Image: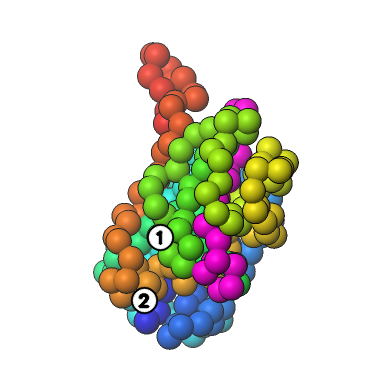
Amino acid sequence: MRILALDGALARASAAVWVEGRVAASALAEGARGQAVALPPMVARVLAEAGLRATELDAVAAVVGPGGFTGLRAALALAQGVALAAGCPAIGVSTGEALAAALPQEIRAAREIWSVTDTKRGRVLLERIAPGAWAALAPPAPYALEELPQPVGPVALVGDAAALAAEALAGRGDVLLTDALLPEAGHVAAVAARRLAGELPPRAALPLYVEPPAVRLPGGGAAPV
């Protein structure tokens, strides 16, 4: 199984090639902007390092969100373009699914994973993954930090707003703050491999929008986020 995986959802751009159960090549660049410029040369680099042509891929995967509008769209457009040229499927992976895949198995098995993404608008998006699961229980939901639900059982926090959520949940249960704050393409590929094998529900490589529109377009229209 040969998968090219991309991510530009949060403050990082990354690409990786997954070959037969392991990451064969990877690259990343830190920063909240510039994914559209950074990702195409990363793709060329990791494919070359893995010794693969795009036409040899079995799938291309990308993070669908939650995340920043520009980074998500850049990664997804590139993933769809490579998949179309290669004649293979484009697979979506959520931010929470990718972050959960970065955690050690002993944490994943014992705790519900809460992926908490900062909307930069005074709220967070909460995506929950059951203990031992690889796919999200439901679409992400928006919350004010003080309105986060009461954890039922042990919880592990991931995502760029995990530290803020840990403060808000202090004293409200068994809550573990992890260091899985930003997705990496190698973990995206690990989830996509399970999805490609039919072990997880399918997810299209299309942007996942949760919050209502935040940007007004000329003429009174609105752009989703």
Residue type at the position of mark 2: Leu
Q: Is residue 116 above or below residue 92?
A: above
Residue type at the position of mark 1: Ala
Which residues are the magenta region?
105-122
- Tell me the crowding category of disc 2: few under 14, some 14 to 19, or many 20 or more residues within 10 angstroms, Cα based: many
Inspect the magenta stretch and tell me whether residue 111 lies in it: yes
Give the residue at x 32% y 71%: 199
Could you say which quadrant of the image residue 221 lies in?
Answer: top left
The foreground one among 95 and 74 is: 95
Q: Position of residue 49 (x, y in %)?
A: 56, 81
Q: Give the label on residue 57, or none.
A: 2
Pointer 1 or 2: first along the chain: 2
Residue 3 appears in view: yes
Inspect the magenta stretch and tell me whether residue 44 lies in it: no
Identify the residue position indicated by label 1 in the image: 135
- Tell me the crowding category of disc 1: few under 14, some 14 to 19, or many 20 or more residues within 10 angstroms, Cα based: many
Query: Helix, strand, or loop for circle 2?
Result: loop
Q: Position of residue 21 (x, y in %)?
A: 46, 83
Q: What colouring method underlies this structural image?
A: rainbow
Q: Position of residue 190 (x, y in %)?
A: 47, 72
Quick check: marks 1 and 2 in contact, CB under 8 Å? Answer: no
Q: Is residue 93 left or right of residue 34?
A: left
1 or 2: mark nearer the eye:
1
Query: Helix, strand, or loop for circle 1?
Result: loop
The foreground one among 8 and 124 is: 124
The quadrant of the rendering that contains the N terminus is bottom left
Give the residue at x 47% y 77%: 18
